[in-house]
């Protein structure tokens, strides 16, 4: 019973999104691209900051 409620709720939410079809491939591609961009930014910012550190000074402590 619980699974059916979640399935019905998800289908109704998907069909109500700005006139898009439930399984529109462009919408999924755009969402995946956006998430990939956010993940890249979230991992590159700390890595860029760490590249400015001198390893010898950091290890000496």
Image (cartoon, rainbow, N blue to C red):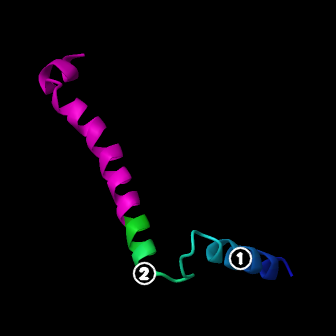
- 27 and 54: which one is in front? 27
Q: Is residue 46 left or right of residue 55?
A: right
The image quadrant where one finds the N terminus is: bottom right
Dot 2 corresponds to which residue? 25
- 16 and 33: which one is in front? 16
- Residue occupying the point 25% across, 16% down: 61
Read off the magenta span.
33-61
Q: Can residue 52 be found in the magenta stretch?
A: yes
Count every numbered label the image shows and give the total.
2
**Magenta span main SS:** helix
- Residue occupying the point 17% across, 33% down: 51
Q: Crowdedness of circle 2 by 10 Å Cα count: few (<14), some, many (20+)?
A: few
- Residue occupying the point 36% across, 52% down: 39
Vertical relation: 38 (above or below) 11: above
Outermost right residue: 1
Vertical relation: 38 (above or below) 54: below
Of pointers 1 and 2, the one earlier in the residue sequence: 1
Q: Secondary structure at mark 2?
A: helix
Residue 12 disc label: 1
Which quadrant of the structure image shows residue 53?
A: top left
- 33 and 46: which one is in front? 33
Q: Is residue 43 left or right of residue 59?
A: right
Image spot of residue 3 (x, y percent): 78, 79
Vertical relation: 18 (above or below) 15: above
Q: Secondary structure at mark 1?
A: helix
């Amino acid at each position: 019973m619980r699974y059916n409620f979640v399935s019905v709720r998800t289908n109704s939410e998907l069909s109500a999104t700005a006139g898009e079809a439930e399984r529109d491939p462009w919408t999924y591609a755009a969402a995946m691209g956006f998430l990939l961009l956010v993940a890249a930014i979230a991992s590159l910012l700390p890595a860029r900051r760490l590249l400015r550190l001198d390893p010898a000074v950091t290890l000496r402590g």
